[in-house]
Image (cartoon, helix red, strand yellow):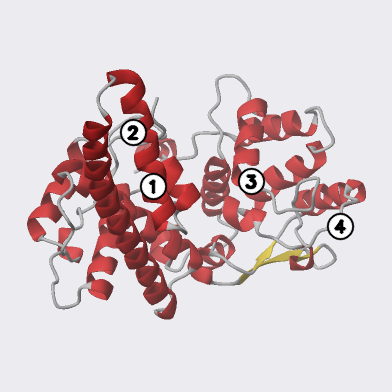
Amino acid sequence: MIPSNQKIYNIHAKNPRNYFLKITEICLSFYKKSMHKTIKNSKKIQNYILEKTQKRFLEDVCMENLMEEFKRKMFLDGKSKRTIEVYSNSVKEFFRWFYDSYGNVEYKKLYRENILEYKSYLKNIKKSSHSGNNLCPKSINSKLSALICFNEMMEPDNIVVSKKDLIKIQAEIVNPASITKKEIEEFRQMVLQSEGCTARRNFAIVTILAYAGLRISECLNLRKSDICLESNQLKVANGKGEKARIVIVNSKIVSAVREYQKTDHVESEWLFHNSRGERLNQTTINRVFNICCPEGYEITPHTLRHFYAINAVSSGIFTIPEIANQMGHSSIKTTMRYMNPNLEEIRQKVEQL
């Protein structure tokens, strides 16, 4: 079986000549063994493949250069590392769709017709890799926003996609927490009682997510120097949009982190790390949630953040700006989405009229 071009490309990308020769050598060998044709005909095939492979290689190199320039411009524009990564991947996804749809046609520039067809593809055909369902409007808009940025930065004299193309999303009211405090506590205990030397580490993580409302990326990016147990606070140095904030934590978090630190004997700058001292990745945490989640529940890192927001709002203890600061919301409008009325309370009040 002939190896894929991509595999050989990865090996010989630094030496185009070797890349071409390797491709033709493999194809020639395959042809000789399977078809038993003459050397003369094999040479014709070799030349044909060389021509086609060289063209595709040059296209790949040009596209890679284009993406690197796009990343550079986003960096100079002050985009966060996360935004640069997401936008780059989204634009690459567009180009994969472009070549899959239009074959080996050389990319010249963006055309509005292509944008509209791609938008239709995202709405009607593209499936979520997580749920298997159609993409939600928010996901589609994220991909279109990447193309808007690419268009503005790389082809400013050829604007064919703008914010007007984004799908209009009705302002959402967040549903009441789908999980109770009792269920959260059951989950935390399951994590604490899980086997292995990482139980206390994982227990500290889920406690921070549930009772400080951090995003999972913010939690895993905490350094040991970012948390001060004596003053009950931690510093989120790189929140969403590269914004820093101070978060006040409760005694549950202080106790969980303190007990974890007693068992942490690995040299590392990261608060949460693996056995080699490397920053913990989200895949590891997702595995913990899958293993420890009680049967019948669906708990994710974002479920715990959602739980924190709903309970902070419904408690009436905090002001909306205070909750917005704790959660790292850039606008209190985002926080106010959690001010969902309790239907049972409304029924009782209606009866009192």
Residue sitting at 54 percent across and 72 percent down? 243
- Locate residue 269, reporting x and y percent: 78, 62
Question: Which residue was labeled with disc 1?
Answer: 21
Mark 2 → mark 4, Cα distance in angstroms:
54 Å
Picture quarter containing residue 64?
A: bottom left
Mark 1 is surrounded, within 10 Å at the Cα level, by few (under 14), some (14 to 19) or many (20 or more) other residues, namely some
Is residue 123 in sight in this rendering?
A: yes
Distance of label 3 from label 1 (alpha carbons): 57 Å
Q: Give residue 210's mark.
A: 3
- The circle on residue 304 is none
Residue 202 drawn at (x, y percent) = 74, 41
Residue 352 in view of the camera: no
Lower sequence index among marks 3 and 4: 3
Q: Secondary structure at mark 3?
A: helix
Distance from disc 4 to disc 1, alpha carbons, whole Å, reads: 48 Å
Which element type, helix, strand or loop, lies under badge 4?
A: loop
Amino acid type assigned to the residue bearing label 1 in the image: Leu
Which label number is shown at residue 28? 2
Q: What amino acid is at disc 4?
A: Glu
